[in-house]
Amino acid sequence: MFPASSAIDVRLQQRLCEGQTGTNPSSVDSVDIGKDQEVKLKPGNVLYIVNKLYPYTVEFVKEPGTSKAKGVPETIKSLSKRSRDSPQNDNLEILRKNPKAELDDVLNNSESKEMPRHTSEIKAQGHWSQGLKVSIQDPNMQVFKDDKVVVIKDKYPKARYHWLVLPLQSISSLKMLRTEHLELLQHMHAVGEKIAQQHSAHSKAQFRLGYHAIPSMSHIHLHIISQDFDSPCLKNKKHWNSFTTDYFLESEVVMDMIKLNGKVTVKDGASELLKSSLQCNVCKIQQATIPQLKEHLKKHWP
């Protein structure tokens, strides 16, 4: 139990945020937390986990039967601000946390795993990165479905044609893939190729099928994207480079990795590819800005 007016001492372990002093630090408000550094999280402060992807704040709630000055940290609510490019997920996930447990225990149990009794209840409003899990269940978003996969239109397409192939099986990311998933990946690829072929037949569009090396959305998904990149949702260098550099792993390459090594290996420094200069995906001529690049791309449109 903590006094309602006091601060909570928070010690963040290195494993919590994949290296506090690296590219994915945790922070309190705008202050990054260094390795082995101890900070005080006060009521109203926002704790950001992993490069500000997961914002939380602690509310102090009076415990029945205690004095006015006593209380326990009972709820943690997501305060993530969703941008126009951030799909929404309004589901609430109920987690359980031992008051003495490390904060990383909460994150490691974010799939609603139940922890020991005599716990405080934590309610976490779904972050936009979990939005695909909602989309899978939304029949209004589905353009194809069978017993293994669902295909949906990307909410914020980066080209004229942009779909996502999602397995019904829960697989959070590429790093979770193993040999037993190869048949599923092959099926996802086959479905993606069929959709691409159907649309290229009448639109003459060229397509690529692949995965982002470090996706922003949880739940593995295969992109089917036309190479015109004619979309108002393509707004910045990160958007462009995520589909036109080696950050975009071809579907065949991912399947080959599984065949040969039993897992997918993402090269160190892959995130730096998002900072690459803007280069036309057709003629390789560099452009200074996104507007200039978009104007240039019109020369290559069918």
Image (tube, rainbow, N blue to C red):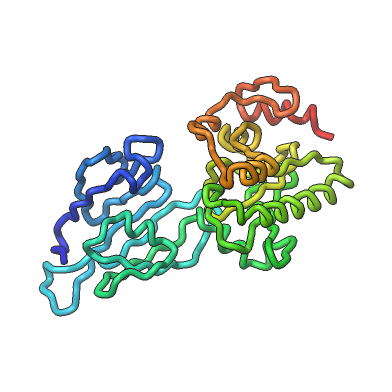
Q: Residue furthest front?
A: 260
In the shown orientation, is residue 117 left or right of residue 279? left
**Above or below for 166 versus 242:** below
Apparent side of residue 22 relative to residue 140 in the rendered image (left or right): left
Q: Position of residue 168 (x, y in %)?
A: 63, 63
Image quadrant where residue 252 sits: top right
Along the viewing direction, whichever of 98 and 279 lies nearer the viewer: 98
Position of residue 205 relative to residue 133, above or below, is: above
Q: Which residue is located at x 37 percent, y 70 percent? A: 114
| 5 left or right, relative to 49 | left
Q: Is residue 130 above or below residue 66?
A: above
Q: Residue at x 75, y 37 (%)?
A: 228
Quarter of the image for the C terminus: give it. Answer: top right
Q: Residue at x 28, y 41 (%)?
A: 33
How far across and how far down the image is residue 159, in percent? 71, 42
Q: Position of residue 106 (x, y in %)?
A: 34, 59
* Quarter of the image that includes the N terminus: bottom left
Q: How many marks do you count on the picture?
A: 0
In the image, taking residue 187 as reference, residue 15 lies left or right, namely left
Question: Can residue 15 be spotted in the picture?
Answer: yes
Residue 92 sits above or below residue 251 on the image = below
Quarter of the view holding residue 66? bottom left
Residue 158 seen in render: no
Give me the residue at 31% from left, 56% from top: 57
Residue found at the far right of this picture: 202
**In x, y percent, where is residue 187?**
72, 56
